[in-house]
Structure formats: structure tokens, C-alpha cells
């Protein structure tokens, strides 16, 4: 049977924008002065993706994940990634409840901490590659397979992984296959001088993520995410996305491995949510330009010469955008 795309509605953008900005206002009670980063995080949530927060310690990465979970009335579970963490510590285990059950082959499943709406993978690059790979299936298929049986995770499902970009001792770089499963990489950055002044005046007694009241429930998040799939994308914008992603593979000798087709789809999904949050029911090229860095940069593998020259993947994306003709 032929599958037709969902029919757009001019009201979709307004409904999504209302919910989006309610979430934004709520989260900013905890994460102040970082509106752009919070918008990117919420876009990832409604685009049904996963988020990689790459920044130095103490800038609010954990608080952001918990604030998002509290704002949607969802469960947040934290996994502290360490070298001795096992895959089963993430996914869960099957076990017999007794000797008789073991003889009968009667096993029960004990879910791991990955069974939550928001899963915070703290310092994800400190676990071994084998343990990191335990996230691959659940991030892509939203299920965990243990002992041959698949167990779905609850929707919505958002993995928020953190890593420190300046601390390399005792870390394992995330493989390309895993990086490709993160819709965006976001850096929170240090607060502004005024925001840090306010933090000092309150002596850290501000609102905590756990004190936030939900502004919507997990079912409403699902409906908004579905409505976002109806945001209109014209053929020129589709081709603009393809041209940009293709350019990462062929247009610059400093890039050893460009973005995959999964990246094209990720950029499309994110742009739909971004447009809707701006009260529009259609995507414009500026949405693509705004999101290209966070969506594509972490997927690029640069040459050793580019690394030596301290080339930055986000700057390369900006250069590629400058070479492309913007559709009108």
C-alpha cells in the first residue's frame, strides 16, 4: 500500500509553538541565560532524537536533563559511566527467580536504568566501548533485547549524554556509529557575567529541577512530536539539505568522513520542530542554516592535518553553507 505523508495544517505550528514555549519557560527557571541551548535541547526532544552535551563540568548539563524530565512529568534516570560499568548495568538482566524456575527455563526480566523517559548518561566516554555499544540498539530502535526477548522503553525516550571535551585521561572516544545516533551536539557554555552574579546572590538556593511542576504530560509530548511531522518542507529546502550533507562528503579535503543519510533525516526532523517553535507551519532555509552546526558537526571525522591545524567541525559547516546557493 502506498504511504502518503501526513497532511499539513496551518494550526500545527501554533500548537507546537505554544507547548514548546511553555516547556522553554519552565526549564529556564532552572537553566537561566542559556535560551539558545535550551531551545536546541527541546527541539531534540520533540524531534524524537537524542542529545550529546559536550562541555566542562559545572555548567548545568545534569540540571538541564532533569529539568526537561520534570517539565514533562517524566521519569529521569541517571547512569554514571565508569570503566567498570557493564552493559547489563544499563539494559537490565534476565534471571531465574529460583532453582525450580531455572530448571524450567523460566526467566524474569529486571529492567535497567535505561527504562525511563529521560536517561542521563553522565560522562559517557568514560565507559569501555563494549559498554557504550549497549546504547546503540535502544537509541535507534527504542527497545532493549536481552536473552533474545525485546523490551520497549517508555515513550517519549530521550538519551542525554554528557562528556568533558578537555579531559582525555581514562576516556574512550565515542565511535562514529554512536555519534551518528545523537540528533544534536550542544555546548551550554559558561553563564553570562550577570547570570553568574545572580547565582552568587542566591547562593545556589534557586529552584531545583525536582521542584519544577510539569507543564504537560508525556502523552502531550507524543502528540506534539507527531504534529511536527506535518510541518511543510518544500522541494527546494529538501534539496538544500541534500546539497549540504553531500558537501560534507566531497567538498572539503579536511573532512575524512562526511555525514550520513541519517544526518539528512535528522536535520529535516529538527528543522520542522524549529520552524513550528517559530509559529510557522513551513520550513525555511534559515532553519537549516541555524541547525546545521548542532546537527552535523559531531558526525564529521576530520583528517589528522585538520586536527593538527585545530580546524573546528562547526566552522567547516559554516564554510560549506557559505558556498551553497540559498533557495528562495
Image: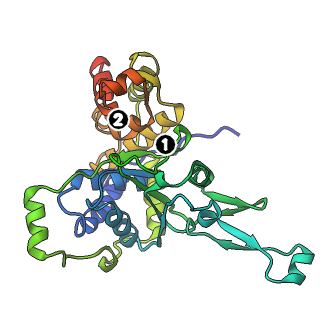
Q: Mark 1 near mark 2, Cβ–Cβ under 8 Å?
A: no
Residue 155 left/right relative to 55: right
Judging from the image, what secondary structure is the residue with disc 1 in? helix
Which quarter of the rendering shows the N terminus? top right
Point out which mark residue 271 bears. none
- Judge whether 149 appears above or below 269 on screen: below
Please determine whether, in this image, residue 282 is positioned above or below residue 236.
below
State the colouring used for the structure image: rainbow
Q: Is residue 11 visible?
A: no
- Residue situated in front as seen by the camera: 153 or 232: 153
State which tag comes first along the sequence, 1 or 2: 1
Which disc, if any, is residue 292?
2
x, y (%) of residue 266?
Answer: 46, 40
- Please state the horizontal and vertical placement of residue 290, each as a whole percent of the image: 28, 38
* Residue bearing mark 1: 179
Q: Secondary structure at mark 2?
A: helix
Quadrant of the frame with the C terminus: top left
Vertical comparison of 262 with 212: above or below: above
Between residues 208 and 230, which one lies in front from this camera angle? 208
| Residue depicted at 53% across the width and 31% down the height | 261
Locate residue 101, reporting x and y percent. 87, 80
Amino acid at each position: 500500500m502506498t504511504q502518503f505523508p501526513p497532511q499539513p495544517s496551518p494550526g500545527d505550528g501554533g500548537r507546537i509553538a505554544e507547548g514548546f514555549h511553555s516547556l522553554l519557560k519552565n526549564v529556564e527557571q532552572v537553566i537561566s541565560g542559556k535560551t539558545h541551548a535550551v531551545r536546541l535541547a527541546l527541539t531534540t526532544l520533540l524531534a524524537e532524537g537524542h542529545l550529546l552535551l559536550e562541555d566542562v563540568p559545572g555548567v548545568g548539563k545534569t540540571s538541564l536533563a532533569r529539568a526537561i524530565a520534570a517539565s514533562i512529568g517524566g521519569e529521569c534516570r541517571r547512569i554514571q559511566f565508569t570503566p567498570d560499568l557493564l552493559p547489563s548495568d544499563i539494559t537490565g538482566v534476565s534471571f531465574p527467580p529460583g532453582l525450580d524456575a531455572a530448571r524450567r527455563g523460566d526467566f524474569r526480566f529486571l529492567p535497567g536504568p535505561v527504562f525511563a523517559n529521560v536517561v542521563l548518561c553522565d560522562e559517557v566516554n568514560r565507559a569501555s566501548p563494549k559498554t557504550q555499544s549497549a546504547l546503540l540498539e535502544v537509541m535507534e530502535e527504542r527497545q532493549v533485547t536481552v536473552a533474545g526477548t525485546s523490551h520497549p522503553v517508555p515513550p517519549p525516550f530521550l538519551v542525554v549524554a554528557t562528556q568533558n571535551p578537555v579531559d582525555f585521561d581514562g576516556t574512550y572516544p565515542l565511535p562514529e556509529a554512536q555519534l551518528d545516533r545523537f540528533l544534536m551536539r550542544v555546548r551550554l557554555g559558561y553563564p553570562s557575567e550577570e547570570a553568574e552574579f545572580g547565582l552568587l546572590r542566591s547562593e545556589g538556593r534557586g529552584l531545583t529541577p525536582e521542584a519544577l511542576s510539569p507543564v504537560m504530560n508525556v502523552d502531550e509530548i507524543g502528540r506534539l512530536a507527531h504534529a511536527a511531522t506535518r510541518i511543510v518542507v518544500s522541494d527546494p529546502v529538501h534539496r538544500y539539505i541534500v546539497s549540504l550533507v553531500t558537501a560534507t562528503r566531497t567538498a572539503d579535503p579536511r573532512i575524512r568522513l562526511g555525514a550520513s543519510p541519517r544526518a539528512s533525516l535528522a536535520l529535516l526532523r529538527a528543522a520542522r520542530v524549529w520552524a513550528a517553535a517559530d509559529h510557522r507551519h513551513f520550513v525555511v532555509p534559515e532553519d537549516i542554516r541555524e541547525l546545521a552546526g548542532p546537527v552535523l558537526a559531531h558526525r564529521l571525522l576530520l583528517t589528522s592535518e585538520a586536527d593538527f591545524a585545530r580546524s573546528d567541525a562547526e566552522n567547516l559547516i559554516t564554510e560549506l553553507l557559505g558556498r551553497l546557493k540559498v533557495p528562495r
